[in-house]
Image (cartoon, rainbow, N blue to C red):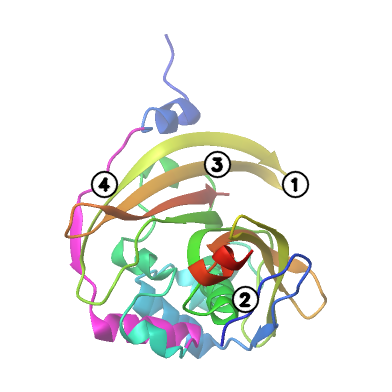
Amino acid sequence: MSLELREGELLPDLVKNPTTRQLVQYAGASGDFYQIHYDQEFARATGLPYVILHGLLKAGFLAQLITSAVGSGGILRSFEVTYRGIDLPGRACRCRGLVTAVTDGIAELEVWTEDPGGTRTTIGKATVQMPEAEAAAE
Amino acid sequence: MGEPSLMERVKSRIGWRGEEQVNLVEAGHVRRFCEAIGDDDPRWLKEAPPTFVVALGTETPQIPEALEYGKGWLNGGDRFEYLEPIRIGDEIRTRTVLTDVYEKQGGSGGLLFLIFDTEYVNQHDRVAVRVRGTRIRR
């Protein structure tokens, strides 16, 4: 399914319910074995309340938000994220996005993750090149 | 002249280059990465999803001088620039360079920012993806 990206349009929300099991899966698949993501004592010793999500796992969630909304016709050109707050397993991580501009077949998106309190824990931007046919039709 | 400060010693590492790594993009690896994120788009049976490249590199390069600063690592952000898709079966060469180091004062003490740039070059000698990662010691 491909969404027609129009300025001001919200992408369909993607809600993730990460678990510690998922953090271990991501550690193994990504090769990031930093212990703050699966060793509770280690995480606490560095000042964290509990093990936390990998920033790049949240980036993966946001990339999924974008590619599932855009479909295979749109080409992701750039994607950037800033990790502003921690996310914990056992708490929902809501991925959201907004089309901020569409110019010459290039859509600009703002994307973010929200914790259950509505705080934006990851913020980011992306640019997507829209399919040729749509660009030509303008 | 006195001993160089920790910041001077960390800054002297700007330009540090990691070992070149060559990795084949394996179907099973991409599948496990997608399972960890929870992205079951069939598109990823042939192609790597946008953040997969991080699994082809290493963990945050362990610059010894940086480890003397603070208690642990935080991930500040990541920027991806996509030039070509990465497909299953591609052979990807990567090398990471430390391009900048700076210090900021945070609410609970100093933060050391390290900027790492990595290029992912395919078997056709074309850069497929560039990633800029911001890693923080605190």
Chain letter for mark 3, please.
B
The CA span between labels 4 and 2 is 32 Å
- Asked whether B87 or A52 is in front, the reply is B87
* In the image, residue B44 above or below residue B17: below
Provide the residue span drawn in magenta.
B15-39
Chain letter for mark 2, please.
A
The CA span between labels 2 and 1 is 20 Å
Q: Residue at x 47, y 78 (%)?
A: A72
Query: x%, y% of residue A53?
Result: 56, 74
Give yes or no for contact between labels 4 and 2 (Cβ–Cβ under 8 Å): no
Residues marked 3 and 2, same chain: no
Q: Identify which amino acid the numbered label 4 is placed on.
A: Gly
The CA span between labels 3 and 2 is 23 Å
Where is residue A10, by image quadrant?
Answer: bottom right
Q: Residue at x 23, y 79 (%)?
A: B26
Q: Which residue is mark 2?
A: A50
SS class, disc 2: loop
**Of the residues tagged 4 and 2, which is closer to the observer?**
4
Total count of labels: 4
Residue B68 in sight from this viewpoint: no
Where is residue B90, by image quadrant?
Answer: bottom left
Residue B112 is tagged as 3
- Asked whether B42 or B20 is in front, the reply is B42
Q: Residue at x 25, y 52 (%)?
A: B126
**Of the residues tagged 4 and 1, which is closer to the observer?**
4
The CA span between labels 3 and 1 is 13 Å
Q: Residues within 10 Å of mark 3 (few under 14, many from 20)?
A: many
Q: Identify which amino acid the numbered label 2 is placed on.
A: Tyr
The CA span between labels 3 and 4 is 20 Å
Q: Which residue is mark 4?
A: B18
